[in-house]
Image (tube, rainbow, N blue to C red):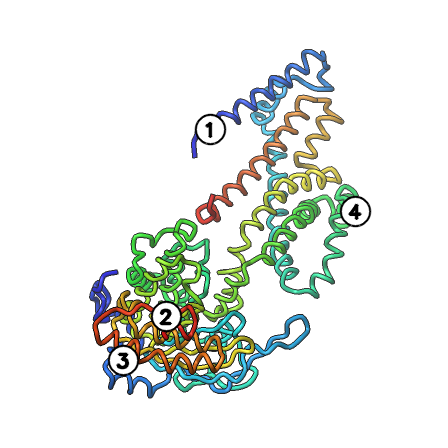
């Protein structure tokens, strides 16, 4: 993707189209002061949210007393094992489901129904097979009654943002899996959402594609300044993308921890090899495994070792996936 | 798509069919009132067109088929949607729908002629009735099998109920609905002929009866039969073409 639009203007520079500006605030740069002011305004806040489903006649609590806030213009990730209610969480925030108890607010206003301020990217692209890429991207605008000329202009700008300009007239069955998911992301952005919710959006892609998509997502984020909340079961993905990672427990989903990722921006792929990355990943892993001993061991042992290595300028390779005590 | 690979086999098959027909007539030494030779039928077909007989009757039948199909298909899509979306509607209506299909139109036709006279209306009703069943089932199945994930997408974008139907459910179910219409189109022809047999003064069904019963013009009878078959094939092709236009470009393979 080119960086033409980095200043927030559309590539063709016309007055009308500042298609990726979602709010008056520009994409954040990550100096310390900014981070603090950003933290102060929560884009999404969940308070004591619980949700049950009836499965085979038995009530099952999927989310139990979940509270956390998502800072505006940042990237926040939610990780958790299968069955921790991650997808339910996104459906609640997007207004597709309502909580049984507790409140969810977007920029202070309670969510009561599907909300146009939220763009949702599902695990599968969910493109309409009878529409071309550009008409798929323009679909939300069409439903909202935007005229053909206008919505196509907007859709074209977004297709360019995700690198699909040449495939505007292609039908979904003519696109690769990765291209379909790009189109789905463009569609989620077409109404200039203040918040972009992603539900394991890259889980169907292979590992290499996934890394590339993560980088591209960050690029898109930097250009649009949208608040991103991404649900994933990949610790590496969460750490690479997010400023903060919310760790959920297995069913019923509860917030086990909130791990801050002190990596700078912009994040390049080599961030994956840094000690800071490994430490954050190991911490998340410890919280996921859930035993207090793991967490304690990790916190006692990990920090000093990696600091030494990092000061020496060496990239520190840790295997964050071999358990909390790996750094000893 | 290759012109030759499409057209050549069709022509070869048609020629083979006519030759077989001729061979049966010659070898079996069949009299004209059992099976007239193909060239005799072809000749009569042409003269019937030239003197206006064929069009006089075919135009009526075509009108019956067209109106009957439109009414039947329209109702079928509407009720099929209702059946797919409402359990109650399905329970209440499906016994009658199945019963209406199980009742032979041959029996129903005279009754309808009795009630509605010998004009256009009873034929439209019979056509609609016979067309209804395959399309209502296809629509029901089609709407029920619409990907719920697409419907969730629609809800997340706050599509109105009307948009849900026109933008998501209908296009998604269209391949199935059109499949039902293919069957329905050919059945509509049968409906019109049966309706005409029960009482009419014009139509291809009437022409067959005339040719057989009072004119003893057997080549004309077979020419009419060929005309009816031709209408069926053309209608089927029409639906296929509509299918290709509407869903051909987005369906893979």
Quarter of the rendering containing residue B229: top right
Distance from disc 1 to disc 3, alpha carbons, whole Å, reads 62 Å
Instruction: Give the label on residue B111, or none.
Output: 4
Nearest the viewer among A254 and A119 is: A254
Asked if B168 appears above or below B104 in the picture, the reply is below
Distance from disc 4 to disc 3, alpha carbons, whole Å, reads 76 Å
Q: Is residue A19 visible?
A: no
| Marks 2, 3 in one chain | yes
Instruction: Give the label on residue A191, or none.
Output: 2
The mark closer to the camera, 4 or 3, is 3
Asked whether the residues under the numbered discs 4 and 1 touch, taking CB atoms below 8 Å apart as contact, a structural biologist would say no
SS state under label 2 = loop
Rendering coords of residue A252 (x, y %) = 56, 78
The mark closer to the camera, 2 or 3, is 3
**What residue did someone put label 3 on?**
A25
Chain to which mark 2 belongs: A
SS state under label 3 = loop
Chain to which mark 1 belongs: B
Asked if A256 appears above or below A270 in the picture, the reply is below
**What residue did someone put label 1 on?**
B5
Chain to which mark 3 belongs: A
Task: Residue at 48% x, 28% y: name it.
Answer: B7
Distance from disc 2 to disc 3, alpha carbons, whole Å, reads 17 Å
Task: Residue at 39% x, 60% y: name it.
Answer: A181
Task: Residue at 66% x, 60% y: name it.
Answer: B83
Distance from disc 4 to disc 1, alpha carbons, whole Å, reads 48 Å
Structural crowding at the residue carrying mark 3, measured as other residues with C-alpha within 10 Å and reported as few (<14), some (14–19) or many (≥20): few
Asked whether the residues under the numbered discs 2 and 4 touch, taking CB atoms below 8 Å apart as contact, a structural biologist would say no
């Amino acid at each position: 993707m080119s960086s033409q639009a980095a200043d927030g203007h559309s590539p063709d520079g016309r007055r009308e189209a500042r298609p990726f500006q979602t709010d008056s605030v520009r994409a954040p740069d990550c100096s310390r002061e900014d981070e603090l002011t950003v933290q102060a305004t929560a884009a999404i806040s969940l308070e004591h949210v619980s949700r049950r489903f009836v499965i085979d006649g038995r009530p099952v609590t999927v989310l139990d007393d979940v509270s956390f806030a998502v800072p505006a213009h940042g990237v926040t990730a939610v990780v958790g094992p299968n069955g921790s209610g991650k997808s339910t969480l996104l459906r609640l925030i997007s207004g597709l489901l309502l909580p049984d108890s507790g409140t969810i607010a977007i920029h202070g206003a309670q969510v009561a129904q599907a909300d146009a301020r939220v763009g949702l990217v599902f695990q599968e692209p969910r493109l309409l097979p009878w529409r071309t890429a550009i008409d798929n991207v323009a679909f939300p605008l069409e439903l909202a009654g935007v005229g053909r000329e206008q919505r196509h202009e907007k859709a074209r700008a977004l297709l360019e943002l995700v690198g699909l300009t040449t495939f505007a007239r292609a039908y979904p069955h003519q696109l690769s899996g990765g291209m379909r998911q790009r189109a789905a992301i463009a569609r989620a952005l077409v109404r200039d959402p203040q918040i972009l919710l992603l539900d394991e959006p890259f889980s169907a892609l292979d590992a290499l594609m996934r890394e590339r998509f993560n980088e591209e997502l960050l690029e898109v984020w930097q250009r649009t300044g949208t608040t991103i909340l991404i649900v994933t079961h990949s610790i590496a993905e969460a750490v690479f993308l997010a400023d903060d990672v919310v760790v959920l427990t297995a069913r019923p989903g509860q917030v086990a921890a909130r791990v801050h990722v002190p990596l700078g921006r912009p994040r390049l792929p080599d961030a994956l090899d840094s000690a800071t990355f490994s430490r954050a990943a190991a911490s998340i892993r410890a919280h996921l495994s859930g035993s207090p001993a793991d967490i304690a061991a990790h916190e006692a042992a990990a920090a000093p070792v990696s600091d030494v290595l990092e000061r020496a300028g060496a990239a520190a390779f840790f295997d964050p996936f071999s358990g909390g005590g790996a750094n000893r | 798509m290759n012109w030759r690979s499409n057209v050549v086999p069709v022509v070869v098959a048609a020629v083979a069919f006519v030759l077989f027909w001729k061979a049966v007539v010659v070898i079996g030494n069949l009299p004209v009132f059992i099976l007239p030779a193909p060239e005799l039928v072809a000749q009569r077909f042409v003269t019937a067109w030239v003197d206006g007989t064929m069009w006089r009757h075919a135009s009526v039948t075509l009108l019956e088929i067209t109106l009957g199909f439109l009414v039947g298909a329209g109702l079928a899509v509407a009720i099929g949607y209702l059946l797919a979306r409402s359990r109650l509607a399905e329970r209440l209506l499906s016994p009658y729908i199945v019963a209406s299909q199980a009742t032979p139109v041959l029996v129903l036709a005279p009754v309808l002629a009795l009630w509605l006279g010998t004009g256009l209306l009873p034929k439209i009703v019979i056509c609609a009735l016979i067309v209804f069943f395959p399309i209502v089932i296809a629509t029901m199945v089609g709407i029920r099998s619409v990907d719920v994930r697409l419907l969730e997408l629609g809800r997340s974008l706050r599509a109105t109920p009307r948009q849900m139907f026109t933008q998501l459910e209908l296009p998604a179910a269209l391949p199935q609905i059109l499949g039902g219409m293919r069957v329905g189109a050919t059945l509509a022809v049968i409906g019109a002929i049966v309706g005409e047999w029960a009482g009419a003064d014009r139509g291809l069904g009437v022409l067959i009866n005339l040719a057989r019963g009072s004119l003893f013009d057997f080549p004309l009878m077979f020419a009419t039969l060929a005309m009816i078959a031709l209408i069926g094939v053309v209608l089927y092709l029409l639906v296929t073409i509509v299918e290709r236009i509407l869903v051909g470009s987005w369906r893979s393979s």
